[in-house]
Structure formats: C-alpha cells, structure tokens
Amino acid sequence: MPETDRLRGLVDAGIALSSELSLDDLLQKLVETAAGLTGARYAALGVIDESGTELERFLTTGIDPETHAAIGELPRGRGILGALITDATPLRLESIGDDPRSVSFPAHHPPMRGFLGVPILLRGRAYGNLYLTEKADGPFTAEDQELVETLASQAAVAIENARLYEAATNWSAQLEALNEVGTALAGEIELPRLLQLICRRLRGLIGARVVNIALPGPDRTLRIEAADGAGAEEILGLQLERAGSKSGRVLERRRAERVDSLADDAEVDQQATQPIEARTGLYVPLLAAARPIGVIVAHDKAGEDPRFTDDDLRVAETFATRAAVAVDLSARVAGDALRRVVEAQELERRRLARELHDQTGQELTSVLLGLKAVEEATGDAERAEALAAVREQVVETLHDVRRLAVELRPKALDDFGLVPALERLRDTFAEQTVMRVDLESQIRDRLPADVETALYRIVQEGLTNIVKHAQASAVSIVLRRSRSAVTALIEDDGRGFTPDGSTDGLGLLGMCERLALLGGKLKVESRPGAGTTIVAEVPLS
C-alpha cells in the first residue's frame, strides 16, 4: 500500500475510532484497522486485567471460528505476549521462534513468524497491546511500527472516551434503577417481604449470583432473614456469630468491604459460604442514622470473572443507604402495630374483667344467696320457690357467659364462616336492643380466615358504636364481593356526627389499623342528623 494511502487510511481510522462509543465495537474495529494498515494476515488485541499481570480479553481478526474452536482457550499473556505486558514498549521480530521468551503454539494454531507488538497506553498505564503477525509482503518495518504506534495513540483517546461514555451510561441506568427501587421499597412496609425485595433488586443491579440479608439476633448473633438466588434456601435462617463472621465484623466496623477470594479471608465464616460454593463477596452494612441494623451480602458476580468491581461496591453502598431507611421504617411500623395490638388486647381484657366482676360476679353471688335461701326454707312450697329463683338466676348467668364467649370468638365464625356468624350477631344484637337489623350478603364461599375475622370485628365494633352513640332505630349491613376485594357496609339512621371532629370513642382508629394489616381501607360518611355509613374494604390476593 502506498505511503500516502496508508496515511490517509490512518486519518480515516482515527475519525472512525473517535466516533465509536461502544467499547467492544471499538476494540474490534481497532484490531481490524491495524491489520488493514500493515497488511498483516492476523491481528489481535489483548486487554490487560486490573492486576496488570495477564490478559482478561483477547480479540482477533484473520482466524475463522472453526480454528478458534480447535485452538481452545484464548491466551492469558505468556511468552512474547507476556513480554509486552511486563515491558510496555514496542516489539518487532522477524521470527517469533528466535526470541528466547517465546513459547510453543498450541495445537491447531496457524503458523506465525513475523511479529509486531505495540502497547496501548492510557494516561501512562498500559490498557492492552496490539499484536500483528504474518505480513503479506515480508517482515514488519520501522514504518509499520510507527504507523501502528500512531494508531494506538489515537485509539487510546477513543478508548478513554468510550470507557467514560460506557461508565456514564451504566451509572445513569443504575441511578434510574435505584430510583425505581427506592419507590418500590417505600411502598412495602411488611418486613419479611421488604427484605426479600431488597435481595432480589440488588442481585439484579450488580449481577450477583446470590444475595442475602443478616439481621442482629440474640446473644450477639446474626440471622440470615432473607436470601435470593442460587442456593438461597441453603442459607436462609442460618445463624452467625458476630465475632466469628465477616458479616459481624463489617457490622461492627460499619464499613463496606469487597472480598475477591473468600477462601483467603480469615474473617469469612465458611459455614455461610460453603453451602452455596461462594467464591467472592460484597459485604455492606445497613446503617440507619449511623446505627447498624443489618448487613447485605452479595456473592459471585455473573460471568467468567466472579469478582465484583469498585462500581459494584459503590452501587451496593448507595442501594444499602436507601434500603436501611426502608428496613428501619418497616421495623418501626411493625413495632408500633404490635404496641397498638397489645394495647387493644389490654383494653379488651379490662372490659371483660369489668363485665365478669360487675355483672357475672354479681349474678353468681345472687345464685349463692339463692342456694342459702333454699337451705333455710322450712316448707316444700318455700323450697320449690327458692329453687325456681336459683334456676332462673343460673340461666341468666349462663346466657351472659355465652355472650362473653361469643364476643371473644364466635364458634360459628370458625365452623361456618363470616355470614352465619354475622347472622348470629344480628339476631343477638336485635334481641338485646330491640332495633331492626337487616343483613344482606352476596358472599357464597368462605373467605381467608384473617379477612373473615377482620370484617366480623369491624361489624361487631360498628354495632357497638351504634348502641353507644347513634340513637338509631334501624341498621343495615351489606356484604359484597368482587374478583379483587370484599366490602362490608354498615349504615344506621341515627343522629350522626362530624367525621373530622373527635372520634376517639368510636373505635375508628382500631378499625383502620385492623384493615391496614390486610392492605384494606376504611371510609366513614356521616353528618349530624343524617345517620352514619361505614365502608370497610379488604383486597383479596
């Protein structure tokens, strides 16, 4: 090729390389351009790994796929190839075999004699090397070397631009994914599902084979509460010693760590890594206001190299910051819900205690007095009258005890379901209050037990409120079911109230919390003099 044509080709190549933003496409184009400019039959580009000691990628041109397959594993940087890694200076040989550093070619490798190697330097550091062999018209010349060095200089700038563009694109995609994850985490307050969501999302973000979360347990232990990926079931529920595990040490140090070889790190608890045959790891603490609340652990990046990168660590740390806030909030919500449940239980216990003391207790005392009257009776008629009074008192007491038992847990609810239980509640309520109660139901089948219990309690509380506050003469209860939800509507013709006023005595907060635990909602419509309508809706999964 005439010198002017080669120079023109070099200029065109520089323009083409600078316009290529895909790093893989850029490297392949560079190999092909170098071969075309020098007339080499074979050309290759070796990318040096982060350790700077061997090749992690090897791109070629001139060798067909069948020959590639026959040769087998691509070179890692030994012999002449390794010489350019060790000493990043150009190397030109008339015969590869004459150099003492050369090694024999593998089987099925095409014969190669002439050789030209040129390093590609990025800011003084070798990114990789161009290798050219078998020039068509004789050995490689000094002009060839100078031409390839100029190409490599142009390529270095293009490679840096492509790497920056690729990094910016990846980071933009990761930021978008992190925003999506943040939204998803904010919408999930149930702790077990939240932890599983965190594991699944982080595994997708950094391409890990398996991710788990360990939370502090009793006696300075950590327990793996959630895991996602290959072998997750093998480690789920596993307990680790804080002082004897990498997770525990990271939690104490409150600093993320990357481990490229788990076998070489003395802090790694092999009990947690051997069941899933993990080789590498990322350990990131979950910190809520600088307070350690758990550890996220990722193992084995997908691909040929299982080691995670600094970018992976950065993404995991950013993700963990958001996840920690969600986990802390979920734990607080769970704790607050538990506190409210305990308070509600205590209120119910106090109410039952008053009922037993003030009513049932007095009735049993009356029974004892009646029995004493029977003992003191002097005639058959007087004794018969006293026994009849005692019998009536016992019947009333049994009725009250049964009423309390039904209020605690109606047997019909367990045996027959929501509708029969509400029919029994309706009859009892109407009998006790002399109020007209209508019950209409579109439900034919049994509902999930927690849904039936919640709706029963809400109707029960609604009827109690009507007796205490509404001064109503009639109540309507309507149950409806759709494909996705079940709804209970309670309506009375009482005096009503202003919903935005004080409703502490109406039990509405307890109703809302009971529904919230099932993902449901409560709607109240009322105004003074116009009665009250309560609508409770529970989704059906």
Image (spheres, rainbow, N blue to C red):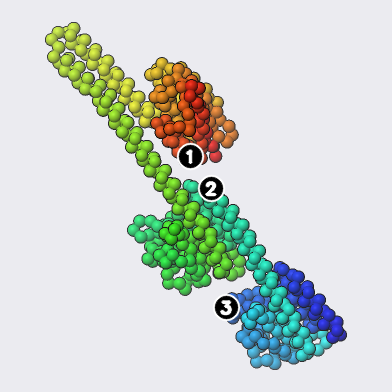
Report the front residue among 181 and 529.
529
**Under tag 1, what secondary structure?**
helix
Residue located 77% across and 76% down the image: 14
Report the front residue among 449 and 361.
361
Going from the N terminus, do you reach mark 2 or mark 3 first? 3
Is residue 306 at least partly visible in the picture? no
Residue 176 placement (x, y as % from top left) = 62, 57
Residue 285 placement (x, y as % from top left) = 46, 62
| Placement of 533 over or under 265, stated as above or below | above
Q: Which residue is mark 2?
A: 187
Residue located 48% across and 47% down the image: 190
Q: CA distance from mark 1 to mark 2?
A: 13 Å
Instruction: Determine which of the numbered discs, if any, sits on residue 500 in the image.
Output: none
Residue located 69% across and 72% down the image: 161
Q: Residues within 10 Å of mark 1 (few under 14, many from 20)?
A: some
Residue 510 placement (x, y as % from top left) = 42, 36
**Under tag 2, what secondary structure?**
loop
Which of pointers 2 and 3 indicates the residue nearer the eye?
2
Going from the N terminus, do you reach mark 3 or mark 1 first? 3
Q: Which residue is mark 3?
A: 51
Q: Residues within 10 Å of mark 3 (few under 14, many from 20)?
A: few
The amino acid marked with disc number 1 is Ala
Going from the N terminus, do you reach mark 1 or mark 2 first? 2
Q: Which residue is mark 1?
A: 516
| Placement of 176 over or under 76, stated as above or below | above
Q: CA distance from mark 3 to mark 1?
A: 54 Å
Q: Residues within 10 Å of mark 2 (few under 14, many from 20)?
A: few
Q: CA distance from mark 2 to mark 3?
A: 43 Å
The amino acid marked with disc number 3 is Ser
